[in-house]
């Protein structure tokens, strides 16, 4: 038996009933048309291993005795794939890489793809490192691509990007975070949104960009209104409602003018920017009422003082 056969048997740990098919008596791999088959005579590659039952290939590295795909403790890199080609040029004009590591498995279970990552600040508990990009496919038209600190998902313009929580019984659980760049057909309100972000909720109502299902805490919130701030209340021609008319409106509607009713707020929520604007408007109107009342009080005070002086004479 040739040495080449002995090398293959030692590499793959084949049993006594394994079959190795080699055409002719030449060293295999010397030409592009020569293949080696293990368990098959219909070879389709330089090395073709076929197994109907059990494992097709077992690599025992570094440990004596019966092992199945283990024994990595005494070897730094128990498995490695390299690309070796020193001829030709890439599309950008650079030379093809020579003896470049494309895949490397470490003895702690870490898998590196596309690089050795020797100069990278890797975290100690990382088990998968990928250079350049990575794509996760659900189908040919539904997939997610991660590259250069960005995540892009492709789904023919349908569906969300979601982060969800599943229960211990493998049920779907609930959505914690979702983004839809094209709107959705399940809106309970106006479905004209171009894109939105939802956190801990799947109830999407109205034309809003952010939906939060629960409380929100922030150290500072700035709302920039496109409409005029209510300094117009202090303009000379502002139509301040007479107090008598304001009283009738309050008795009839149980709210101030331009303030939404409790029923409306319960159904639609509050627009913080618009609500703040209206509150300032009412404060400024209240200031005008107080100024007018103070003027009336001053006039009444002057009349009372005049009457008192007349009586003393």
Image: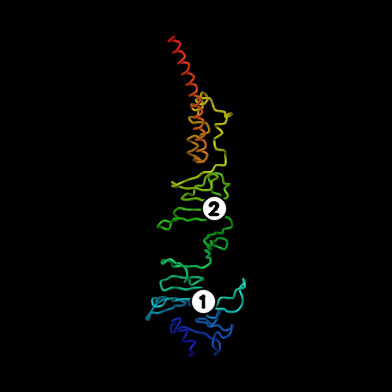
Residue 153 place in picture, x, y as percent: 54, 59
Outermost residue toward the front in this view: 313
Q: Residue at x 44, y 13 (%)?
A: 309
Decide: few, some or many residues near mark 2? Use Cα within 10 Å; few <14, some 14-19, many ≥20.
some
Say what secondary structure mark 2 lies in.
strand
Decide: few, some or many residues near mark 1? Use Cα within 10 Å; few <14, some 14-19, many ≥20.
some
2 vs 1, front mark: 1
Q: Quick one: 224 or 302, which is closer to the camera?
A: 302
Query: What's the CA distance linking mark 2 and mark 1?
Result: 41 Å
Q: Is residue 165 above or below residue 70?
A: above
Q: Is residue 233 above or below residue 77?
A: above
Q: Earlier in the sequence, mark 2 or mark 1?
A: 1
Image quadrant containing the C terminus: top left
Which mark is on residue 55? none
Q: Quick one: 72 or 92, which is closer to the camera?
A: 92
Say what secondary structure mark 1 lies in.
strand
Q: Residue at x 56, y 58 (%)?
A: 155
Outermost residue toward the left in this view: 65
Q: Is residue 136 above or below residue 85?
A: above
Residue 49 place in picture, x, y as percent: 50, 79
Q: Which residue is mark 2?
A: 180
Which mark is on residue 82? 1
Kindly check if marks 2 and 1 are in contact, taking CB atoms under 8 A apart as contact.
no
Q: Is residue 120 left or right of residue 141?
A: left
Residue 305 place in picture, x, y as percent: 45, 16
Q: Residue at x 44, y 67 (%)?
A: 127
């Amino acid at each position: 038996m040739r040495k080449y056969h002995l090398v293959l048997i030692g590499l793959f740990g084949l049993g006594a009933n394994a079959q190795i098919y080699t055409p002719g008596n030449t060293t295999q791999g010397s030409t592009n048309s020569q293949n080696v088959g293990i368990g098959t005579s219909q070879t389709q590659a330089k090395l073709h291993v076929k197994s109907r039952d059990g494992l097709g290939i077992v690599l025992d590295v570094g440990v004596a005795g019966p092992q199945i795909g283990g024994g990595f403790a005494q070897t730094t890199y128990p498995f490695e794939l390299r690309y070796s080609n020193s001829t030709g040029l890439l599309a950008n004009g650079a030379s093809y890489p020579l003896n470049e590591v494309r895949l490397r498995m470490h003895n702690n279970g870490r898998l590196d793809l596309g690089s050795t990552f020797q100069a990278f600040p890797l975290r100690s508990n990382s088990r998968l490192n990928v250079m350049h990009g990575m794509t996760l496919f659900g189908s040919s038209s539904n997939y997610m691509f991660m590259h250069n600190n960005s995540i892009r998902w492709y789904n023919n313009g349908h569906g969300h990007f979601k982060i969800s929580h599943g229960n211990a019984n493998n049920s779907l659980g609930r959505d914690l975070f979702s983004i839809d760049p094209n709107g959705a057909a399940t809106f309970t309100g106006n479905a004209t949104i171009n894109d939105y972000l939802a956190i801990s909720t799947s109830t999407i109502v109205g034309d809003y960009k952010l939906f939060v299902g629960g409380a929100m805490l922030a150290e500072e919130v700035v709302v920039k209104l496109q409409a005029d701030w209510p300094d117009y209340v202090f303009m000379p021609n502002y139509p301040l409602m007479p107090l008598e008319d304001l009283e009738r409106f309050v008795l009839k509607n149980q709210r101030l003018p331009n303030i939404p009713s409790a029923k409306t707020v319960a159904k639609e929520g509050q627009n913080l920017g618009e609500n703040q604007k209206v509150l300032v408007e009412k404060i400024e109107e209240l200031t005008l009422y107080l100024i007018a009342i103070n003027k009336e009080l001053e006039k009444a005070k002057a009349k009372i003082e005049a009457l008192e002086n007349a009586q003393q004479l």
